[in-house]
Image: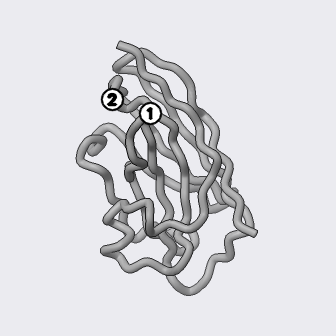
Amino acid sequence: QVQLVESGGGSVQAGGSLKLSCAVSGYTDSHHYHCMGWFRQAPGKQREGVATLAKRGSYIFYSAYATSVKGRFTISQDNTDNTMYLQMNNLKPDDTGTYFCAVEGVSLTREQCANLDPADFGYWGQGTQVTVTS
């Protein structure tokens, strides 16, 4: 059974930084690459993609970012402990929301993975709150 647990959220002032972690368990690596990512949901808004990466073992084939976070956020993973990270710098009040990590349910194509569409992901964590104050 796949389980994802996020941590690292908190409250920061605009311009500050946070690093989110996602511990993944129960997911079997295989010959193919896997798509994993971070998503967020602000109050009253739909869940949106933040960043995704395609990996096989410790090798990351590529990563994709939402336009709003490009250059400020970095997605990474540590294959030794099956943890995915999201380094968030220069945070803005619009970055406020609940952040979720997710893993594909069925294998996604490269284009699907880069689309950052929450509907394509089958396994989700419970989320961690990020609040950015001005």
Q: Residue furthest front?
A: 44
Query: Residue sitting at 47 percent across and 57 percent down?
Result: 37
Q: Quadrant of residue 89?
A: top left
Q: Which mark is residue 104?
A: none
Between residue 19 and residue 99, name the one nearer to us.
Answer: 99
Left or right position of 113 against 33: left
**Of helix, strand and loop, which one carries label 2?**
helix
Q: Is residue 99 above or below residue 48?
A: above
Q: Residues within 10 Å of mark 2 (few under 14, many from 20)?
A: few
Query: Residue sitting at 52 percent across and 20 percent down?
Result: 11
| Quarter in which the C terminus is drawn | top left
x and y percentages locating residue 101 in the rendered image = 55, 52
Q: Residues within 10 Å of mark 1 (few under 14, many from 20)?
A: few
Q: Is residue 89 above or below residue 117?
A: above
**Of helix, strand and loop, which one carries label 1?**
loop
Q: Residue furthest left?
A: 67
Q: Is residue 29 above or below residue 100?
A: below
Q: Quadrant of residue 119?
A: bottom left
Between residue 4 and residue 82, name the one nearer to us.
Answer: 4
Query: Residue sitting at 68 percent across and 70 percent down?
Result: 27
x and y percentages locating residue 73 in the rendered image = 37, 41
Left or right position of 72 against 85: left
Under mark 2, the amino acid is Asp
* Residue at the disc numbered 2: 94
Query: Residue sitting at 64 percent across and 38 percent down?
Result: 7
Look at the numbered discs 2 and 1 and tell me whether their residues touch, using CB distance below 8 Å.
no
- So how many labels did they put on this image? 2
Under mark 1, the amino acid is Pro
Query: For the residues marked 2 and 1, what is the alpha-carbon distance in whole angstroms?
Result: 11 Å
* Residue at the disc numbered 1: 43
Left or right position of 128 against 108: right
x and y percentages locating residue 4 in the rendered image = 66, 55
